[in-house]
Amino acid sequence: MQIDDLTQFIQHSIVGSDSPKIDKNSRLFEDGLIDSLSILHLVGYIEKSLGRKLQDSELLFEYFSTPEMIVKRYGKA
């Protein structure tokens, strides 16, 4: 999973094109860009990118703080 692919997915599939531009440092929860329901959509995207289900122990709030943090944590299969 690449940072550009992730930010595009978040921009177009979760927050919408009319929202502020998502970049690698966008604070997803803090700035209200995603919520508890849209995180499920994001987890599905990550699982599809990795080709596997994420374990409960991998689903920590801090791992989803920014797109950069998501890629650092889940960028490799």
Image (spheres, rainbow, N blue to C red):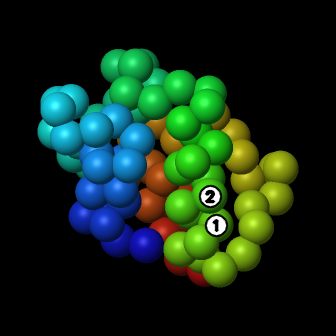
Which amino acid type corresponds to the residue marked 2 in the rendered image? Gly
* Left or right, residue 30 beside residue 74: left
* Left or right, residue 17 beside residue 41: left
Q: Decide: is 9 above or below 62.
A: below
Front residue of 25/40: it is 40
Q: Residues at badges 1 and 2 in contact (C-beta under 8 Å)?
A: yes
Residue at disc 2, secondary structure: helix
The numbered disc on residue 27 is none
Residue at disc 1, secondary structure: helix
Could you say where residue 69 lies in the image, as x and y percent from the top left? 44, 49
Could you say where residue 32 lies in the image, as x and y percent from the top left? 40, 19
Could you say where residue 53 lies in the image, as x and y percent from the top left? 76, 67
Residue in the image at 57% along x and 48% along y: 41
Q: State the separation of the CA atoms marked 1 and 2.
A: 5 Å
- Classify mark 2: residues with Cα within 10 Å, few (<14), some (14-19) or many (20+): some
The numbered disc on residue 44 is 2
Residue in the image at 73% along x and 53% along y: 58
Which amino acid type corresponds to the residue marked 1 in the rendered image? Glu
Q: Quadrant of residue 71?
A: bottom left
Residue in the image at 25% along x and 64% along y: 4
Front residue of 29/36: it is 36
The numbered disc on residue 47 is 1
Residue in the image at 46% along x and 30% along y: 34
The answer to whether any part of residue 63 appears in the image is no
